[in-house]
Amino acid sequence: MDQKAIFSIGNSKFDFGLVREIAEKEGSAAIKVLDRQDVQPSHGRINFEDLYARAKEAIDESDVEPDAIIGDLDFPVTSLVSLLRREYDLPGASPEAVAKCEHKYWMRFVQSHAFPDDTPNYKAINPFATGRGVSAPEFPFWLKPVKGHSSVLGFMVEDTSDLDKALHTCRQRIHLIGEPFNEFLNHVEVDPEVAEIDGNYAIAEGIISASRQFTLEGYVWNGNTVIYGVVASIREGQHRSSFSSYQYPADLPEETTKRASEITARLIDQIGYDNAPFNIEFFWDPDEDKLHILEINPRISKSHAPLFRMVDGVSHHKVAIDLALGRQPEMPRGEGENKVAAKYMLRSHEADGIVADIPDKDQIEKLAKILPDINVNILVEKGVKLSELFYQDSYSYELADIFLGGDGQQMLEDEYNRCIDSLTFLIKPIPATS
């Protein structure tokens, strides 16, 4: 097999290792362009055009022509990848199709045409139009930026007071993602009926949350939608709005998965998304057997990648690489060392605080001796004020990601409880001011 040059945009060291592992096994070269800190800076300020120019420059100055360009992160990576593929005439979804997935209002607009009876009530809200009054839907509803990221600025709004507080916070921070997203939209042909709704708008959506949530990981190959994995999403905390774990494979009825897959294929076709991977999130009410689409992401989930590797024997970066090289993916099933795997998100639900202590290397190494499949990623540093962390939801702070594998659900829970007992985080409360 001829060596291929696979350019991967904005990976962390860990995730790029997964890409390189697959590429080298096939005799190809994995080349990283931009670092994780470049595309997801801790301060949250992104210069999209600068990132696009730097990525093109890095590719042009490399010693090889690109055979594939991939990414596994949300905006701006998904958007950069779509534009770079168009720039170098490589396989992948069009920037317009990617924008329809990324733009929450545009996605609901497309969904309303495919499923007019199953789309939640939704309305665009300009957070800066309060002087003339804001026309909001009937309470309660979720308020989110048109271009969200890691549930940043997502609020449950139950009354006028909640709405005022949410809009106030949006006015302070929505531009951090909204403005660079607008720079991306300048590169695509936007539907005239949604063109006025830019990245500095929010969207109010009727409540669709249910007791169960899951994600389909799939891809489109020459117009055919294929689902290769189902991952359960477990939530906790206020309004059950914070993810506590992802578990693969999800324990779902086959009929539910089949119906969700059929819904997905119809929406994907309506979007015009082709020859690229995606993941789509659903809420499922098992009592009434109702399914609701939460959102669709034009990429593989990097959070799920280690889970596929532990259960199926290879990260699903393989799907992204295959498609980017213009070939139909061949994803193995059940060839890993574990029957089940999970990513646990260790969180603080305190109002705020200062990180006084974090697990040391010795604590993690002791756990690794008894839990060989464990991978721990500490996300905070000593002295950090929790409220100054950027990529956080509105109701909690993520302290660490912990990946575990095992023979069953009970084993995973036992392993995670051991981690909780062994890993020391100390958060110093901040006294309330009168």
Image (cartoon, helix red, strand yellow):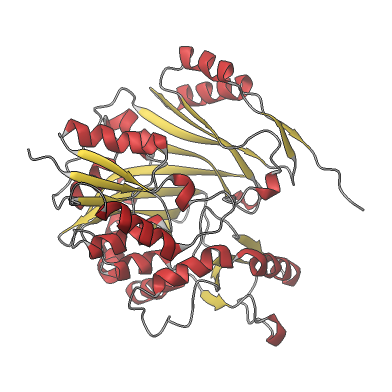
Is residue 117 visible in the rendered image? The answer is: no
Q: Quadrant of the N terminus?
A: top left
Counting from the top left corner in percent of width and height, residue 58 is at 31, 52
Question: Which of the pair 366/80 is nearer the observer?
Answer: 80
Counting from the top left corner in percent of width and height, residue 218 is at 28, 50
Name which residue lies at 42% across and 45% down: 35
Counting from the top left corner in percent of width and height, residue 59 is at 27, 53
Instruction: Please identify the residue farthest to the left as the structure is shown.
Output: 1
Is 361 located above or below residue 350 in the figure?
above
Question: Which of the pair 162/380 is nearer the observer?
Answer: 380
Q: Quadrant of residue 125?
A: bottom right
Name which residue lies at 63% across and 82% down: 135
Name which residue lies at 43% across and 81% down: 195
Instruction: Please identify the residue farthest to the right as the structure is shown.
Output: 434
Image-based side of 62 in relation to 419, left or right:
left
Image-based side of 240 in relation to 350, left or right:
left
